Amino acid sequence: MPSEVYSSQNSGAAQPPAVGTPPQQGAPEPGSGTTVHEDQVPFKDQVFGYAKTIRGSVLRKPETKATGEKILHGDMSAKDYFEQKRQ
């Protein structure tokens, strides 16, 4: 059998030396490994802003496109948009 041939050929082979790897080190406390940029628009708002901008372009509605651009620039959040829409 092939497994018998393989094991008989490698029976006298030297084993590779054990390598000591340091233990995995993570962040000791929440938030210590991340950097939050205050001037950036949140990801959810970016997605919504791009969607509004594209929708405004496709449907040829400049006010919808302008709303999407405001959200992308951080002048308005998606939450503010939905609160305005409810009123």
Image (cartoon, grey):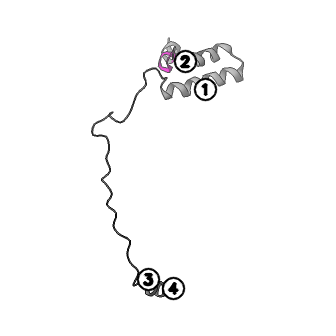
**Which amino acid lies under the numbered mark 2 shown in the image of this protein?**
His
Q: Looking at this view, is 87 or 50 the one in front? A: 50
**Cα–Cα gap, marks 1 and 2:** 14 Å
**Which amino acid lies under the numbered mark 3 shown in the image of this protein?**
Asn
Q: Is residue 61 left or right of residue 24?
A: right
Q: Which residue is mark 3?
A: 10
**Which amino acid lies under the numbered mark 4 shown in the image of this protein?**
Pro
Q: Which residues are magenta?
A: 76-81
Mark 1 vs mark 2: give the one in front.
Answer: 2
Q: Which residue is mark 4?
A: 2
- Label 2 or label 3, whichever comes before in sequence order: 3
- Label 3 or label 4, whichever comes before in sequence order: 4
Give the number of callouts.
4
Residue 84 magenta-highlighted: no
Q: Which residue is mark 1?
A: 51
**Which amino acid lies under the numbered mark 1 shown in the image of this protein?**
Ala
